[in-house]
Image (cartoon, helix red, strand yellow):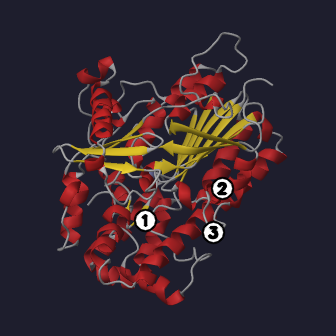
């Protein structure tokens, strides 16, 4: 076998515990489950950041958010100091293709450097005008009226078309004359939810109530405010629709899987399925993503299939970071190269029982002034609380330690308290001390040229419009 192709499909906002092969009670992901059964599943893959821009930038740069700088204010283009994964793959002789339904990974964000072919399905002129006009209509009507008219349903188009994205990727792959590196982002499980994604919906009335009152841009603050007044069934309706969206993304992925097999490419390709971060449904007081660093938001699915690299049915319980995908791609690109390689964090060792992976993984969530301002504006009851503080977390197999920049900290015992409901920091001062030191060391760990960077420039109004539609900025 020559060097394998690589196709990475990232399903935005997909939390690991809503995926069948990770133990979910519903059959949301038959195709991911099959890919896992034929490849290697990573039990504990942790993203460096629970929000899109920083998470994708980490995959592309192999750096943590405080190192790559796509952090804090989400509406920034990517700095150019670090070499991007597509560039590195192209230098290694790969044909590089990207298809993104996420506006944070777009030409406007300068996230497309190094791709031989890139299609941002949010970038067409017609779609821009569509989003711009609908956004204006909604703002001028006011949220209650816009919700009643189900304008959010139309705005769901801002999430793009997963089937179209994967078919576009297949088109690029067909044209490739050398090994390919593909990166595709699907947005289905990201809010707002499509009104038609009802495969798991139990009550039409509660779905209607959710769609009318909450779905869409104002979902997060509304959910926080309404939590006291909405019946649990309406909140459950959100999860039902989310699961329906997951199923839709999985079905589209299944088409691509079958196409790769028919085209005779499947076994010569590293097929990776992952998510950029999870999604919270009220855990830790959070709806949506960001604003907490617990497993519901940081633990993501990661499944890798390529028979030459992982035997079928492998399950890896080592601790890994999502951006270890970066090192894996570079390693795969040198597959067949007789020189020994550094295998420190390399996922290609996932099926090796002696491989320990990482002892500690790190995540960060910085204060998001713009989003908090929007929450305040749309919800008079909103209290930012802990969210105005910089948040850092260290996780081992057994513990999660969270630290805030005002000195507050929490410690969760993951063996006894999987859902991280009660901090046991007071009972384990020595563990806290150890994690505090680890974190301090991590925060000092910066690539040498990082400090000399200018702050990246603002992005233009067109991108802002699309980000508004997804609820990121006001
Ligand atoms: Zn995301």
Find residue 104 and report its horizontal and vertical position in percent.
41, 47
Residue 145 is drawn in which quadrant?
bottom left
Q: Whole-Å distance between the Cαs marked 2 and 1?
A: 38 Å
Residue to which mark 1 is pinned: 130
Quadrant including the N terminus: top right
User: Please, which residue is most extreme toward the front here?
Assistant: 427
SS of the residue under disc 2:
helix
Quadrant including the C terminus: bottom left
Find residue 255 and report its horizontal and vertical position in percent.
73, 56
Closer-to-camera residue (273/401): 401
Residue to which mark 3 is pinned: 26
Find residue 364 and report its horizontal and vertical position in percent.
33, 42
Find residue 420 and report its horizontal and vertical position in percent.
39, 56
Q: Is 313 left or right of 55, judged from the image as shown?
A: right
Closer-to-camera residue (43/108): 43
Q: Whole-Å distance between the Cαs marked 3 and 1?
A: 35 Å
Picture residue at 36% right of the left edge, 24% below the top: 81
Q: Residue 21: which numbered mark, if any?
A: 2
Q: Is residue 125 above or below residue 332?
A: below
Query: Is tag 3's residue or tag 1's residue first in the polypeptide sequence?
Result: 3
Callout 1 crowding tier (Cα within 10 Å): few <14, some 14–19, many ≥20: some
Picture residue at 71% right of the left edge, 51% below the top: 256
Callout 3 crowding tier (Cα within 10 Å): few <14, some 14–19, many ≥20: few
Q: Is residue 107 visible?
A: no
Q: Is residue 136 above or below residue 2?
A: below
User: Please, which residue is most extreme toward the top here?
Assistant: 339
Callout 2 crowding tier (Cα within 10 Å): few <14, some 14–19, many ≥20: many
Q: Is residue 326 above or below residue 187?
A: above
Query: Is tag 3's residue or tag 2's residue first in the polypeptide sequence?
Result: 2
SS of the residue under disc 1:
helix
């Amino acid at each position: 076998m020559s060097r394998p192709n690589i196709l990475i499909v990232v399903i935005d906002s997909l939390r690991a515990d809503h995926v069948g092969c990770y133990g979910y009670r519903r059959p949301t992901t038959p195709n991911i489950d099959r890919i896992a059964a034929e490849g290697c599943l990573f039990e504990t893959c942790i993203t460096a950041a629970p929000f899109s821009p920083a998470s994708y930038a980490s995959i592309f740069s192999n750096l943590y958010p405080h190192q790559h700088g796509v952090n804090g204010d989400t509406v920034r283009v990517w700095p150019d100091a670090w070499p991007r994964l597509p560039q590195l793959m192209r230098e290694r002789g790969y044909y590089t293709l990207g298809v993104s339904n996420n506006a944070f990974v777009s030409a406007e964000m300068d996230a497309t450097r190094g791709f031989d072919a890139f299609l941002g399905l949010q970038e067409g002129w017609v779609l821009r005008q569509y989003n711009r006009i609908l956004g204006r209509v909604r703002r001028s009507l006011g949220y209650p009226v816009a919700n009643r008219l189900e304008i959010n349903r139309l705005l769901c188009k801002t999430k793009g078309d997963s089937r179209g994205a994967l078919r576009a990727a297949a088109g690029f792959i067909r044209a490739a004359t050398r090994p390919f590196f593909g990166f595709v982002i699907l947005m289905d499980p990201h809010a707002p939810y499509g009104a038609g994604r009802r495969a798991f919906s139990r009550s039409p009335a509660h779905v209607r109530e959710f769609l009318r009152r909450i779905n869409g841009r104002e979902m997060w603050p509304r959910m926080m405010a309404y939590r006291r007044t909405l019946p649990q069934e309406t909140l459950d309706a959100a999860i039902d629709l989310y699961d329906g969206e997951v199923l839709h993304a999985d079905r589209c992925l299944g088409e691509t899987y079958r196409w790769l097999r028919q085209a005779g490419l499947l076994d010569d390709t590293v097929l990776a399925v992952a998510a950029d971060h999870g999604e919270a449904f009220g855990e830790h007081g959070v709806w949506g993503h960001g604003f907490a660093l617990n497993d519901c938001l940081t633990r993501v699915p990661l499944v890798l299939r390529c028979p030459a690299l992982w035997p079928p049915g492998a399950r890896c319980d080592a601790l890994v970071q999502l951006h270890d995908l970066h090192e894996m791609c570079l390693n795969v690109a040198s597959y067949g190269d007789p020189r020994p390689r550094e295998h420190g964090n390399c996922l290609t060792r996932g099926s090796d029982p002696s491989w320990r992976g990482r002892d500690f993984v790190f995540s960060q969530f910085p204060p998001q002034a713009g989003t908090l301002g929007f929450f305040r504006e749309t919800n008079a009851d909103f209290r930012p609380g802990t969210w105005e503080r910089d948040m850092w977390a260290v996780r081992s197999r057994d513990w999660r330690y969270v630290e805030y920049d005002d000195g507050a900290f929490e410690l969760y015992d993951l063996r006894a308290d999987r859902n991280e409901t009660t901090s046991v920091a007071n009972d384990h001062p020595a563990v806290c001390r150890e994690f505090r030191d680890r974190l301090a060391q991590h925060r000092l760990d910066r690539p040498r040229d990082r400090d000399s960077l200018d702050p990246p420039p603002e992005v233009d109004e067109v991108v802002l419009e699309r980000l508004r539609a997804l609820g990121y900025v006001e």
